[in-house]
Amino acid sequence: MQAQIVRFDHQGQGIALVNNFVTFVPKTIPGDIVEIEIIETKKNYQKAKLIKIIKPASSRKEAFCPFYAACGGCDLQNLSYEATLEYKKNKVKDIFKREGINIEPILIKNPNPKNYRNKITLKVKNGQIGYYEKKTNTLTQITSCAIAKPILNEIMELLSKINIVSGEVVLRCNEKDKVLVIITSPDKLNLEILKNNPNVKGIILNNKLIEGTDYLEMMVNDLTFQVSFNAFFQVNSAVAKIMLELIRENVNEKAHVLDLYCGVGTLSLMAVSVASEVLGIEIVVSAINNAKINASKNNFNNAKFKVGKVEKIITNVPNNYDTWIVDPPRQGLDKKTRDVLLKYLPSKIIYVSCDSNTLARDLKELLAKYSLEKYYLLDMFSYTHHVECVCVLTLR
């Protein structure tokens, strides 16, 4: 079946109208004329598989990764880098417009759009190592990842020699090319080649440390962070540096800061470098342990951290914090936290988000009392449909 791609959806897929029926076609771009096969039909839409490109759009680019056609990692390698930025900007504007909010984001590029990821998660099936195809459990075997740091690709080459047959391998690195190898597998493994590699800082097997350390030290701007193997840290260190500077720039001198979902304390410590104090709250115990170590390591005695689920303990937090930093998971702020925020009414909110849909939902409610002062769109996840946003709201 032949079709023409007319626009993108918000997940970076092309959309064709087949008999006026919305049809999603991955790995295509507007202007492509393609041959497709319908693989799933729903009430209001259908999904199709790309068979071949009959006539490419004038803006189509050849992907720089040889595994792009099947791999589920990147969505937009068929565009120029500048075109991916334009797509993301228009996507975010459209999401906010649907909530009745008009924005003009300040766009921040990735200084290194390729080989930028400091963390990758590899799947292993029948001895093959790779990524799943998008929204499936079908494995695409790979030998390298074009958006991963080169050191991670070097360590990936060694994995075929450790006798792993099934499971998952997470590779994380820092700016000094030291790597944590985190393996989940029932197999009897031969790990000597990893143990003898000078770049492997630690090996964690089925959540147990078996060699080296279970954390990395990450340097961001002028701060050092200890990050446990299972703690969150931004996957793009270069853009993370820019984001943390935005946090520092937008925290008032002598502010009293509450940092929700604080992780290992990256935003907290950047804020407290200019603020009077910060209290960070995070549910992951190892991350809070890291945060406390990081405060001490960077000589901040005015940074405190508490373990807990934000929505459960937020009502017990005193109302003396004039600046709230929130960096919630993809589901955004829960209703209880939004209600407490609108009750306490801090003078400033800095909202960091990796999901524009839940961000727009939350801001629609918050804008009843706040003004959207700044909206930054950071290309944290180049050549994918994902974006990172930083919003600065001030109390009216």
Image (cartoon, rainbow, N blue to C red):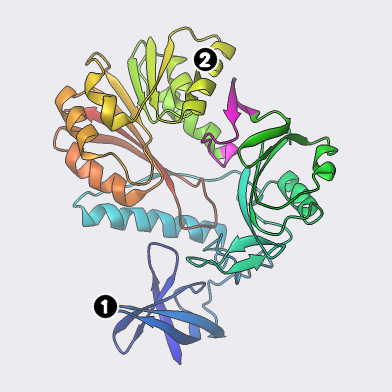
Callout 2 amino acid: Ala
Q: Is residue 117 visible?
A: no
Callout 1 amino acid: Asn
- Please rate how many residues cluster around mark 1, counting C-alpha atoms within 10 Å: few if below 14, some from 14 to 19, many from 20: few
What is the spatial separation of the Cα atoms under label 2 and label 1, in whole angstroms?
52 Å
Which is more N-terminal, label 1 or label 2? 1
Measuring 44% from the left and 57% from the top, which residue is drawn there?
Answer: 86
Residue carrying label 1: 44
Q: Is residue 250 visible?
A: yes
Range drawn in magenta: 216-238
Quarter placement of the C terminus: top left
Is 168 magenta? The answer is no
Looking at the picture, how far across and down is residue 375, in whole percent? 34, 40
Q: Is residue 159 left or right of residue 134?
A: right
Measuring 50% from the left and 61% from the top, which residue is drawn there?
Answer: 83
Position of 30 relative to 208 (above/below): below
Task: Give the numbered dot on residue 295.
Answer: 2
Secondary structure under the numbered disc 2 in the rendered image: helix
Is 236 magenta? The answer is yes
Q: Is residue 76 left or right of residue 161?
A: left
Secondary structure under the numbered disc 1 in the rendered image: loop
Tell me which corner region of the image, top left, top right, bottom left or bottom right, holds residue 52. Answer: bottom right
Measuring 48% from the left and 19% from the top, which residue is drawn there?
Answer: 269
